[in-house]
Amino acid sequence: MRTDLYRLRPVLLLTTLLPAAAGCARPPAAAPLPPAHNLIFILVDTLRADHLPLYGYRRDTSPNLTALGMDSVLFSNARSQASCTFPSVNSMLTSRSGAAFLGQPGGAMGLPAGIPGLAEMLRARGYGTHAVSASPIVRRSPGRFNPGGGFGRGFDTFQEDCVWKSADCVTDQALPHLARDPRPLFLYLHYLDPHGPYAPPAGYRHRFALGQPAKDFVRKGDPNPISDWLYKHGPNPGLTPADLGHLVDLYDDEIAFFDSQLGRLLAAARAAGLLDDSIVVFAADHGEEFLEHGDVKHCHNLFDTTIRTPLLLRVPGAHPRVVAEPVSNLDIVPTVLELLTAPSSRAAGPPGAGFEGRSLRPSVLGRPLPPGYQWAAQGAQRSVADGRLKLVQDLGTGRFALYDLAADPGETRDVLALRRRDFQRLRGALAAWLARTEGGPAAGGMRRSAEADQRLRSLGYLDH
């Protein structure tokens, strides 16, 4: 019986809190939030929302995240701004569209001097700022996949020797930062699991991935032979449905291993007396595709397999709830800055002029959000979504596709011919966003996007 109830926890969370998000049964009004003196920002690379029980997944891949979600404001309709780490993380840490980071001199991928990042803003407010990153892209110093580094500005310490290593390395290096300090703490943790290759440690490898497939690359969780076949005219790897299923199983095994380290991190923060005085942000930069739309890995399309991501905010004093309105990773920085600002100084408005995202503080306090759009860009593709519909434009061909995400969450049917009025509305919104963020003709944005993709390909990142 206890097991059955435990498995129902995500379902209970969604079914009990979604009415409040829809305005049918609002919880008691929350008291004004006191300033939360710490911020723990947990970013999980390549984590798609629909492989988490909190978002309806059938497997219990992440019990510790589920427990965190039961104590958090969960955004059920969040999306990233790109399906690739660069420039998705840049957007997330600055609340600027990815176009602001394309076309930098020398193909740089970091944060340009004219665009402040979250660490810079918080250090100016007296925070101790620390980062641990396993990402080969999100680095302070030059590396093979990001020769320019450029993500360290504003951090007192930026530890990057966990690059390509599993989640226990990041947690090991994070724990010393949880010691009490006179200054409030900003801790940014960039976990790489479940980025490919899908190779969880031995103790987690066979939780979901059962059996021993005949193909070596499948056993190793390496999607690159499929990628080479699709994008480089490599040999056909003879992939079978069982092979693809095994890769998905290994991906889920990696999520389970990360989740064990999330539990370890949160337990340590609680033991140190920090957790109840901290905002915890949980997010992902993008998801992962397993041939649902003809692609593998990421950086190739704007379907929800690669841009629908988890977003949770655990805020002291805020009632747990599910927020169904559409939100974006662009909204994270304005939200946490407003939540971390003393109430007496909020009269001057939210901090950070120039943000493209909006503060989600109203939803944290149980109030409805005004309607908003979600924007994304990858390669020649641009998209806008309003929570129900998503319009995707290919700038190269000029082709549009419109998907009804409520009726067709797998994005398998183009309903543009049936929804002409919605198409015109979203097309106008997308055109206005492109003019605002990329400016000039579409060819300029396409060129910069193509250059960014070619840069990552030439460095070998898109082969990993």
Image (cartoon, rainbow, N blue to C red):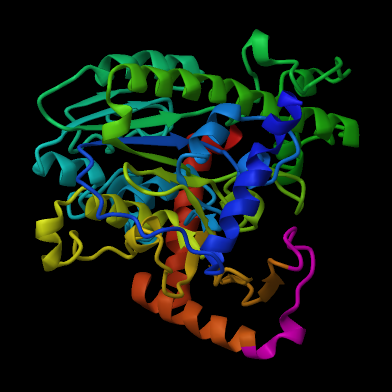
Front-lying residue, 293 or 107: 293
Q: In which quarter of the image is the C terminus?
A: top right
| Residue 221 at x, y percent in the picture | 71, 24
Tell me the residue at 35%/63% (across/down).
362
Magenta stretch, overall SS: loop
Q: Residue furthest front?
A: 28
Relative to 422, say whether 208 is above or below.
above
Relative to 195, say whether 337 is above or below.
below
**Is 393 displayed left or right of 118 in the figure?**
right
Q: Residue furthest top?
A: 202
| Residue 286 at x, y percent in the picture | 53, 46
Relative to 304, say whether 393 is above or below.
below
Q: Can residue 50 be seen in this view?
A: no
Q: Looking at the rendering, which quadrant does residue 359 occupy?
A: bottom left
Q: Is residue 68 visible?
A: yes
Q: Looking at the rendering, which quadrant does residue 265 occupy?
A: top left
**Is 16 displayed left or right of 223 in the figure?**
left
Tell me the residue at 36%/52% (across/down).
332
| Residue 105 at x, y percent in the picture | 28, 50
Q: Residue furthest bottom?
A: 421
Magenta-drawn stretch contains 413: yes
Front-lying residue, 199 or 205: 205
Front-lying residue, 62 or 342: 342
Q: Quadrant of the N terminus?
A: top right
Front-lying residue, 91 or 236: 91
Magenta stretch? Answer: 407-421
Count the marks. Answer: 0
Tell me the residue at 45%/51% (across/down).
452
| Residue 450 at x, y percent in the picture | 50, 56
